[in-house]
Image (cartoon, rainbow, N blue to C red):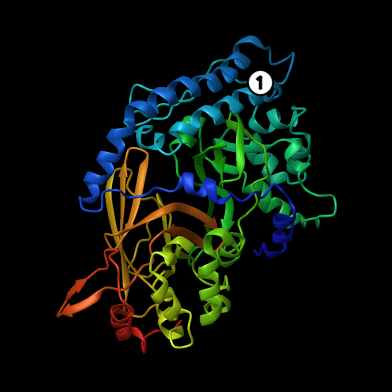
Amino acid sequence: MKFSTVLPLAALTTAFVLPDEQVLGELAIEDHHEHTSVVDSWLEAAESTKNDAFSSLREHIQEVTETSKKTWNKVSCHAKSVLDNAFDKASDATDIFGDRMSEAAADVESWLEENDDIDVFGGRHGRRPHKRPHHHKPNETVYQLIAGSKYTTKLAKLISEYDDLVEALNSTKANYTIFAPTDKAFEKIPQKAPKPSKEQLKAILSYHVLPGFYPAGRVLSTHTAPTLLKGEHLSSEPEPQRVTFKLSLRGLTVNFYSRIIAVNIFGTNGVIHGVDSLILPPPSIISIVDLFPTQFSTLELGLGKTGLLEKLNNTEHSGGTFFAPSNWAFTKLGPRINAFLFSQYGTKYLKALLEYHVVPHTTLYSDAIYQAKKEDVDAMKELPKKGLFHIDLPTVLKDRSLSVDVGRYGGFISIKINAFATVALQDIIAKDGVIQKVDSVLIPPKKLGGAEEEHWDGDEMSVEEFKERLEPYMAKSDL
């Protein structure tokens, strides 16, 4: 299934709002403990922010939670839609939530999953299983709640056109989580925007639905989650297209731009969260690079100069991970190396350098992995919930791999490459893989003799040393 014709809609509508440089900066996770062990770095960072983050989190999340509790306790389901009441009360509470959570936005994820004392949005984590909190026993399915609400009439009308979706969302055989865009979310689409086909509309609707039960507490401590939409280009066979959740200055968001404005509207077969923008199936990796000029303009220039832009702009592959260096990452190399790379003499070095950032056939999220299946490999889906996970990922640069360590402590996840570079912005979802933004350029290690290698640790490097590191791969560099 191809979604390339959805891109004009994504580009024209304000439903697809890209975060600006300031927001990206707020979301970035920087490493300030380069000379300590990976584990020590995570623990020290988490310990230093635990008390402040949780005191802020506990107080202000409770304000949002109360809106849902009041809905169930005070309003008869026969008198007025539960979903209507949740949306009635949601706006002011979520504004407060977004404003006051800004102080703790970069830190709270560390402490959500492991703490047994905090009841976040009614869902406990850590060693305790997820349990559905019932403030008032629901008697309608998630589809009936949407169909009966004055705030989701457009969504209900679209869903009703697909009998299989109606049947699934009305069935109590399984639980579903729906991120329901309000009618106002649909108003963000310009009248002159091209109308998607029936197939594309179903893809968009499916991308708003998660199989399984995700109350708001679980959403808050989850990094990525699978949807009902199958991605054709994420592995050697269709895999669930995922969404990513981030806590930013705007509050809790889906895919960075769609803000969650109402939470925990429970039905007999799942839960609904209201969102203020449609969640569109993502474009390709290269399209996303093009959409972030303030972050990736140098990278895009390099891809075009080396001919990689055209070669990578092809979704007929089995997934992939692009460790995309930001403009700042190139700046850190210094003016001499940049001048050399973008000169006519440095093009082949630039090509090899960029190929070292591209991992084909493996889509590595912060908490999940899709691998193109081989006969002797049982592809893993979810990464371990605790501790360290190590994997060597072969790159497009022949015979060179990236050493990747994914460490998890509670809800906090850090990704390090070659024991030095940290992924500054995780899980930029694409239809043909994932982008992991790095703020240091990844340079192949220097061979010291035998199997011994020396990885670059960020120290200033001369053009001669830079060329020495890449010289062995010139003849082997081939896409």
Residue 92 as seen in the image, left or right of residue 113 = right
> Residue drawn 53% across and 53% down?
240
Which residue appears farthest toward the right when viewing the image? 192
Res 290 quadrant in image? bottom right
Image quarter in which the N terminus is found = bottom right
* Secondary structure category for the residue under label 1: helix
Where residue 359 appears, as percent x and y from the top left, is: 41, 69
Where residue 49 appears, as percent x and y from the top left, is: 33, 33
Tell me the amino acid under the disc marked 1: Lys
Where residue 81 appears, as percent x and y from the top left, is: 72, 21
Where residue 187 appears, as percent x and y from the top left, is: 78, 41
Read off the residue under disc 1.
Answer: 89
- Crowd rating for badge 1 (residues with CA inside 10 Å; few <14, some 14–19, many 20+): some
> Residue drawn 75% across and 55% down?
12
Residue 243 visible in the picture:
no
> Residue drawn 33% across and 82% down?
467
Residue 421 visible in the picture:
yes
Q: Is residue 438 above or below residue 310?
A: above
Res 124 quadrant in image? top left
- Give the camera-side residue of 442 and 130: 442
